[in-house]
């Protein structure tokens, strides 16, 4: 198993809904959450800055 590092900085990026926590992988910003319509944030790029 092991723990996957979500901050690899390479596509596909992992996006997580700020409302319900739904996660999707995509090369580009997926738009509103398909589950609840909430805002998706990229959790794969936290290493920047
Ligand atoms: Zn959602």
Image (spheres, rainbow, N blue to C red):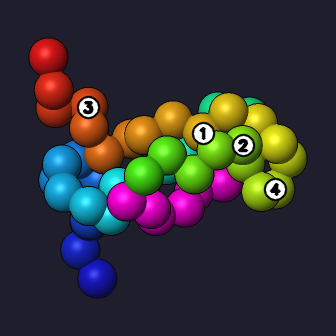
Residue tagged 2? 32
Q: Which residue is mark 3?
A: 46
Which residues are the magenta region? Answer: 22-27
Report if the CB atoms under discs 2 and 1 are less than 8 Å apart.
yes
Compute the Cα span from label 3 to label 4.
Answer: 23 Å
Residue to which mark 1 is pinned: 40
Residue extending farthest right: 36
Residues at marks 2 and 3 touching, judged by CB atoms closer than 8 Å: no
Q: Quadrant of residue 1?
A: bottom left
Residue 16, given in percent of the width and then of the height, sits at: 55, 46
Question: In the image, residue 36 lies at what x, y percent?
Answer: 85, 47
Position in image of residue 38 (x %, y %)? 76, 36
- From where the camera sits, is residue 21 visible? no
Whole-number angstrom distance, CA of label 4 to CA of label 1: 11 Å
The tally of labels here is 4
Distance from the alpha carbon under mark 2 to that under mark 3? 20 Å
Give the number of the disc on residue 8: none
How packed mark 2 is, by other alpha carbons closer than 10 Å (few <14, some 14-19, many 20 or more), is few
In this rendered view, identify the residue nearer to me: 17 or 30. 30
Q: Residue at x 29, y 53 (%)?
A: 6
Mark 3 vs 4, N-terminal side: 4
Q: CA distance from mark 4 to mark 2?
A: 9 Å
Q: How far apart in space, not on screen, are marks 1 and 3 (Cα)? A: 14 Å
Q: Is residue 29 above or below residue 48?
A: below
């Amino acid at each position: 198993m092991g723990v996957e590092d979500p901050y690899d900085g390479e596509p596909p990026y992992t996006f997580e809904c700020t409302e319900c926590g739904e996660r999707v992988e995509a090369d580009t910003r997926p738009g509103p959450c398909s589950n609840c319509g909430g805002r998706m944030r990229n959790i794969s790029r936290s290493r920047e800055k």
